[in-house]
Amino acid sequence: MFDLSGKVVLITGASGGIGSAIARKMKKIGARLILSGTRENVLDKLSTEIGGDTKTIVTDLSSKEDIMNLATEAENCFGHIDILINNAGITADTLFIRMKDDDWDNVININLTASMRLTRQVIKGMLKRKYGRIIFISSIVGYTGNPGQTNYSASKSALIGLTKSIALEVAARGITCNLIAPGFISTPMTDKLTDEQKSKIIVNIPVNRLGDVEDISNGCIYLASDESSFITGTTLHINGGMSMI
Ligand code: NAP
């Protein structure tokens, strides 16, 4: 149904569970891809598997310089960027009372500040060409909060204000800016949970399962497509009914 033929997509966190699923799905519907992450071997393997017009750029999003290089190199890959997926994210869970400054700073820096910095660079080309799709990957816990995840929840909540404000600034220029808020999805990030923790979560998911990475990539292609041109500044919640916000 959706067609991204020829569209150039930059995906951060492409070496991870959700990012690689977005890459595979977008390639199937014609996109040209730039895959970013820190693990070169994983990116290379994915790029070989996907094939075609796929480039990889190794980036540490904790480095301002790396982010500037990523934006420049990505523009140079195919001449421009149509779609930016700010997907990279980390956790450093601990109870609030025990949270160290480093746990706070690292999570805010990767999940929020790096996404802002990259978007601020990439949006310049979108403004010139009067076309763009920007998608941030937030989280259900950015809306509900979660014990042990004050830093992560705060970073994901902050993306909501960032998205809405960017959306308002660029809406008249053919650029949309939206969020996807996944619920609990089976990926290396949630593999860290124990079976007991997973069972407790599933009890609260009306569809009675954790989400699959494809559930997220399906939502992502909609927000990246031309069909979603009247949708901006909003959140697509993909959580199996866990939280009907
Ligand atoms: P994942 O498999 O752990 O992937 C995380 C990705 O972020 C990896 O590709 C990783 O790259 C990249 N990344 C981490 N630190 C980085 C850094 N300093 N520089 C550059 N890249 C960095 O996690 P996931 O589950 O796919 O999560 C993807 C997004 O969805 C995240 O924003 C996460 O918060 C969000 N989310 C996930 C869930 C879930 O249930 N899984 C739920 C809600 C929201 P390398 O591995 O190459 O370092």
Image: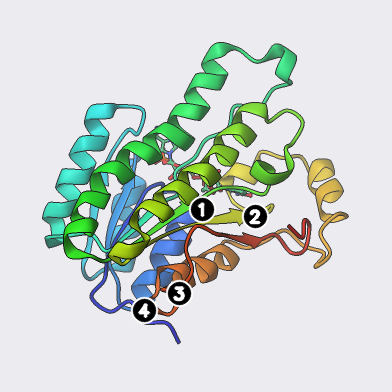
Q: Is mark 3 within 8 Å of ligand 1?
A: no
Which of the marked residues, 3 or 1, is nearer the chain's N terminus?
A: 1
Front disc: 3 or 4 = 3
Residue at 59% in and 27% down = 92
Callout 4 crowding tier (Cα within 10 Å): few <14, some 14–19, many ≥20: some
Q: CA distance from mark 3 to mark 1?
A: 24 Å
Q: Which residue is mark 1?
A: 17
Residue at 27% in and 28% down = 64
Which of the marked residues, 3 or 4, is nearer the chain's N terminus?
A: 4
Corner quadrant of residue 182: bottom right
Q: CA distance from mark 2 to mark 1?
A: 9 Å
Depth check, front residue: 174 or 42: 174
Q: Percent from the top left, x then y, of residue 146?
A: 74, 36
Instruction: Check disc 3 and give the amino acid type.
Output: Ser
Q: Is mark 2 within 8 Å of ligand 1?
A: yes
Instruction: Check disc 1 and give the amino acid type.
Output: Gly
Instruction: Check disc 4 and give the amino acid type.
Output: Ile
Which of the marked residues, 2 or 1, is nearer the chain's N terminus?
A: 1
Q: Is residue 81 left or right of residue 94?
A: left
Circle 3: element type = helix
Residue at 38% in and 39% down = 116
Q: Are marks 3 and 1 in contact (CB under 8 Å)?
A: no
Front disc: 3 or 1 = 3
Q: Are marks 2 and 1 in contact (CB under 8 Å)?
A: yes
Circle 2: element type = loop
In the picture, the disc for residue 29 is: 4
Callout 2 crowding tier (Cα within 10 Å): few <14, some 14–19, many ≥20: many
Which of the marked residues, 4 or 1, is nearer the chain's N terminus?
A: 1
Q: CA distance from mark 4 to mark 1?
A: 19 Å
Q: Which residue is mark 2?
A: 185
